[in-house]
Every structure is written in C-alpha cells, then in structure tokens.
Image: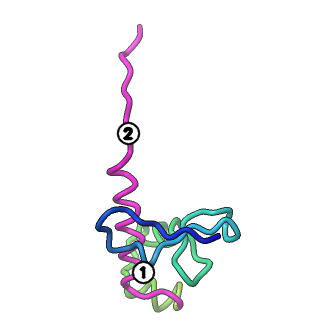
Amino acid sequence: MITVINMVNKNYSDRIVLDPEVHFGKPCVKGTRIPVENVLELVQEDISFKRITKDYSPDLTVEDVKACVRYATDIVQSEEIHLGSASK
C-alpha cells in the first residue's frame, strides 16, 4: 500500500509518498526509490537543486527537490516540543 503525504494545502503531496515496500516506509520521491532524506543530505552540502537533478539523481526534477525541502520544513513546523523544567 502506498500512502501519499496529504498535509493540508501542501505543494508536495503529489511528489512525496510513503510505501512500506520501499525503504521501510520512509518518505520517498514518488515514482522513484529515492528517500527524501538522501535529497536533503545533498541540499545540506550546499549542492544546487539543478546540480542534484543533473549529477546526482537524474530521475528527479527541481520541483521534486523543492518538495523534499517543503516536506522537511512542514515536519519540523508540526513538531511538538515539550520542555521540562531544569532539575538541579
């Protein structure tokens, strides 16, 4: 079963999918076996979106790379952070 990520009004829901049969269900770019995590690692190394699609992952488009970044941003934004009081 493939689950398409469907966060409200998000521009990546048609590009990022979760499939338990691919990379243990980690989010991947739809139609590929490329995990979002791998794309983000390239972005983290300051590699341009265009170069990622040309040199590292020709199966991706610049829009796929942007979708990976939007997905990661939304995950962080939706994170719940619970801070405890400092104990001495």
| Residue 44 on the magenta segment | no
73 over 79 or under it: above or below = below
Residue 38, image x, y percentages: 54, 69
Question: Which image quarter: residue 25?
Answer: bottom right
The residue carrying pointer 2 sits among few (fewer than 14), some (14 to 19) or many (20 or more) residues within 10 Å by Cα, namely few
Which quarter of the figure is the C terminus placed in? Answer: top left
The residue that label 1 is drawn on is 64
Looking at the rendered structure, the kind of residue marked 2 is Glu
Q: Which residues fall within the magenta stretch? A: 59-88
Residue farthest along the top direction in this orientation: 88
Q: How is the image coloured?
A: rainbow
Residue farthest along the left direction in this orientation: 9
Q: Secondary structure at mark 2?
A: loop
- For marks 1 and 2, give the CA distance: 27 Å
- Give whichever of 48, 27 is nearer the camera: 27
Q: Secondary structure at mark 1?
A: helix
Residue 50 disc label: none
- Give whichever of 3, 52 is nearer the camera: 3
Which residue lies at the image location 59% right of the left edge and 63% below the top edge?
26
Which quarter of the figure is the N terminus placed in? Answer: bottom right
Residue 37, image x, y percentages: 52, 65
| Residue 72 on the magenta segment | yes
Question: Which image quarter: residue 50?
Answer: bottom left
Residue 62, image x, y percentages: 38, 85
The residue that label 2 is drawn on is 80
Which residue lies at the image location 38% right of the left edge and 39% below the top edge?
80
The residue carrying pointer 1 sits among few (fewer than 14), some (14 to 19) or many (20 or more) residues within 10 Å by Cα, namely many
Looking at the rendered structure, the kind of residue marked 1 is Asp
Residue 24, image x, y percentages: 68, 62
Which residue lies at the image location 41% right of the left edge and 72% below the top edge?
13
Which residue lies at the image location 67% right of the left edge and 65% below the top edge?
20
Counting the numbered discs, the total is: 2
